[in-house]
Amino acid sequence: MKLAEFTDKHIAFREEVREFARKELLEESTQIERKGEFPWHIINKIKERGWLGVNFPEEYGGLGLDTTSYIILVEEIARVCASTAIMIAAHVSLACQPIYVHGTEEQKEKYLITLARGEKIGSFGLTEPNAGSDAGGTETTAEFVGDKWLINGSKRFITNGTIADLIVFTATQDRTKKTHGISAFIVEKGTKGFEPGKEEDKLGLRGSITSELHFEDCKLPRENLLGKEYEGFKVFMETLDGGRISIGVLALGIAQGALDYGIKYVREHSVNGKPLYKYQWVQKIISDAATEIMAARHLIYHAAMLKDRGAESVTEEGAMAKLFASEVSTRVCSKIHSIFGKDGVTRKYPLERFLRDTKLMEIGEGTSEIQRIVISRQILGR
Ligand code: CAA
């Protein structure tokens, strides 16, 4: 299936990534997730291809492609292994992107180049034990003492947490100001007073890492402030606008991967001597799934292409893409699973992994309920 607006360059890039995913990832993707082992060897191959900086300019260590190409990358990888895809998404859209957009020239030179080349891994620290959906309730504190930022507090559910060399994170300078008291910072692994914490035992995406982060009297240089003081919430919300397109495309990739397995299964299996695909109820499931997937694909690539055309904001489009695609994917995975009948009871087929992985797409980077708040505020106002 191709989108009318893909250029020849996009199609060629998609073929390249698809071939990589089929050759390098397909066979071991189930084991990566089931064993819960971070796939360093795969990430190294992705890094060698420059894909960890796919959409950043060459002068900052990137490949110089566009957001649409980055979205293609995540879709094709998620179609085979969502654990690998979410690692890429967190690194590119949540860590590199805010440094690219809000970083000083020095920060781009110091951090973005090594991140985009994949020499360092990035992460994004927003969620806290008491500040999830209510991101403005950030309790981690930042005080400017002497000539340093003094950071105290904890983050939770941080993708790439323990493997990240660098994390962009939020802390409040004044809790009474709520969202207007929050600033954004950069911390490097190994900084005294900063330690990644416990890794989560997750429902799905078990080949990816999600962990706590702890700051205890952690001192950061003045220049580790990202963006302006008290504007960190906006930096993070804007970053999530793009991040939500990534989660939408992750969900899309998972749904497409589930459909791929469904099509293979109905072609290879029969009931009462009649091939499964000749049953009308099976045709309905497959055609409805393909249609919903195509609709999600249009929403997602529309949002990505708007970014490429320099849209000032993709708040509404990003939230719609994530909301729709994640709910479509859960529905598609569940319906396809029902075709597998008794085989769906076991873990013989990778479909059970797709079902578990996709549920997290309705939660990460803002639950479906949060997306509905974001969309309704765009339409109705506050
Ligand atoms: N872009 C720019 N500015 C934005 C913005 C956006 N997308 N969204 C909000 N703002 C601005 C608002 O304009 C407002 O500014 P003013 O007060 O100057 O007008 C300010 O930010 C505060 O906005 P709100 O009043 O709307 O804030 P709120 O407290 O009502 O919260 C919310 C809004 C949508 C619920 C927000 O808290 C939210 O998105 N919550 C979900 C957070 C989330 O997705 N968390 C998952 C993070 S993933 C993670 O941490 C782990 C990982 O590794 C993936």
Image (cartoon, rainbow, N blue to C red):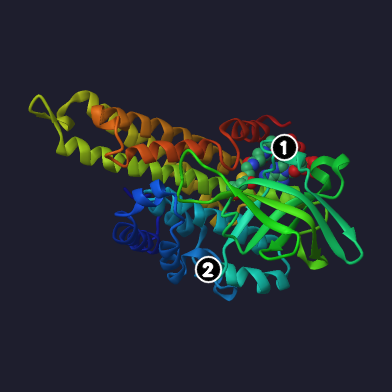
Q: Could you say whether the residue bearing mark 1 is in a helix, strand or loop?
A: loop
Q: Residue at x 61, y 64 (%)?
A: 165
Query: Is residue 289 shown left or right of residue 176?
Result: left
Q: Ligand 1 shows up in which quadrant of the image?
A: top right
Quadrant hosting residue 15: bottom left
Going 53% across and 47% down the picture, which residue do you hit?
245
Identity of the amino acid at label 2? Gly
Mark 1: C-beta under 8 Å from nearest atom of ligand 1 = no
Question: Which residue is more in the foreground, 27 or 195?
Answer: 195
Q: How many marks?
A: 2
Task: Tell me which corner region of the image, top left, top right, bottom left or bottom right, holds residue 148.
Answer: bottom right
**Closer to us: 168 or 4:** 168
Q: Position of residue 256 (x, y in %)?
A: 35, 43
Answer left or right for 44 relative to 146.
left
Residue under label 1: 130
Q: Residues within 10 Å of mark 2 (few under 14, many from 20)?
A: many
Q: Dot 2: what SS? A: loop
Asked whether the viewer can see residue 312, the reply is: no
Can you give x and y, in whole percent of width and height, for residue 59 in the image?
58, 75
Is label 2's Cβ within 8 Å of ligand 1?
no
- Please report the residue visible at 44 percent of the width from the left and 49 percent of the height from the top: 36
**Of the numbered discs in the image, which one, if any, rests on residue 118?**
2
Which residue is at the far left?
273
- Mark pair 2, 1: CA separation: 32 Å
Query: Looking at the picture, how far across and down is residue 143, in whole percent?
Result: 87, 55
Q: Quadrant of the C terminus?
A: top right
Frontmost residue, 137 versus 230: 137
Q: Earlier in the sequence, mark 2 or mark 1?
A: 2
- Callout 1 amino acid: Asn
Q: Would residue 310 be found to the left or right of residue 77 on screen? A: right
Q: Quadrant of residue 275?
A: top left
Q: Position of residue 80 (x, y in %)?
A: 35, 50
